[in-house]
Amino acid sequence: MRIELDGIVGLGELEDAALAFGRSAPAQLVADAIESMVADLLDVVVGPFGLPLATEDQSEALFACTRCASRRGFRRRGFRPKLRKVTTVCGQVAFRSQQLECLTCGRRFAPAAELLGLTPHQRRTDQLSEMAASLAVEVAYAKASRLLAELAGPQVSARSIRRDVIAMAPDRVGPEVCEVPVLLLDGTGERAGQTKGGVALNLAIGLVARTRQGQRVKVEARLLGATLGEGWSVMGDLLAEVRPGLILVDGEEELSALAAERFPDVPVQRCLWHLSRGVYRAARYTDKSSHDLATDFGAQLETLLTNAYRSHDLNAARTAYDDLIDDAEACGARAAAAHLRGATDEVFTFLTHPAAGRLLFGDKGRPEVGTGVLERVMREMNRRTDVGVRWSIPGVRAILMVKLQRKYHHGPWAPTPAPHHPPTARFSLAP
């Protein structure tokens, strides 16, 4: 490495020079490494330039003739006149392509592309496309292009990034696991399409593990299904092979009907946070009750649920629940009473099926049965799409499916098993 200084420079100038060098040097190093690797390989397989080994003396190559698929019997034919250029995560790599002639069929070809895993006419690596898509699911396409150039160096246009996202996105996402202790179902609206209400994003999240890290509880989740602009019946088809131990819903009648139809033997639990919130909203805004009265209904509900969780007395819990419904009706809060009555069959599932969904129960002395994990996911999806304009349905589907897959290491982002003896490459500064 050579350092040139024109007089005394400040730290800012040194930083700029180092960053400029850091953006250009890795690509040049990769290009030099490719040329050196290919040259060493051809020396072993084909022989030195101008002195090829006899066909019978040549070993079987790691590459094949692009016409007859022969793996031996080659001679060198110089370099292609143009550099092969590939944009990578470390910048644009430009290297000379050594040509070979197949002595069997007379075909001329360059083996570097096959050795590097490049397809014909490929101009960007898959790793760069995945990196660009990973940025695009967090910020706007134009901003993702600018950040990619500023932070990593590669120049990728916003249009190219959008094409990468569309190419990676499936129409819907299905499960990669079938055995899940807890299945969460819920949906949210996205500002897309021509209708005023937008389009529905339906999600199915599976909870598979629960661990404690210090004072915090960590829940391991899996993406089981995602659809956009399609009914819950499509989600039911996607989840046909899933076998949950407990289903959590937020109170939507359609979700309860789906659970009863597709999973008739699986217990269904109402999200207690949604239940309490629904009681307050019904009493406050539908029944026009005072804030204090609506808040009191929520406090009584939380108290009876906590007592039920601690005592495990189902009969006492149901009696207290019925008394709360009667109190609401006596106070004129008929909508709140109806909301509580509609949840009767789902509110005490944590007592009637205590072994189902144990991942959700904490040690705070009260039932922690809610769809909070899924709610946070939906808010994250909404933050990316709520940009002040209305999306097209294909556009919002693409960005959300890629974002969900990346978040849960699904599809292209699924971890791949490492080989037992992976090839290694190291770069270091020479002393």
Image: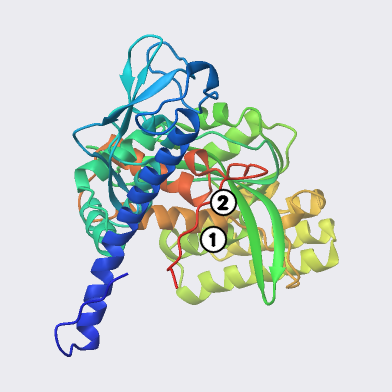
Q: Quadrant of residue 265?
A: top right
The residue that appears at 76% across and 72% down in the rendered structure is 365
Q: Amino acid at mark 1?
A: Val
Q: Tell me which corner region of the image, top left, top right, bottom left or bottom right, holds residue 185.
A: top right
Horizontal side of 368 relative to 415 (left or right) equals: right
In the image, residue 298 sits, relative to residue 209, either above or below, namely below
Of residues 281 and 106, which is closer to you in this image? 106
Which residue in the protein does label 1 denote? 279
Taking the image as shown, residue 45 lies to the left or right of residue 95, namely: right
Quarter holding the N terminus is bottom left
Residue 192 visible from this viewpoint:
no
Closer to us: 166 or 119: 119
Q: Amino acid at mark 2?
A: Ala
Foreground mark, 2 or 1, reads: 1
Q: Local crowd at mark 2 within 10 Å, few (<14), some, or many (≥20)?
A: some
Tag 1's secondary structure?
A: helix
Label 2: which residue? 338
- Residue at disc 2, secondary structure: helix
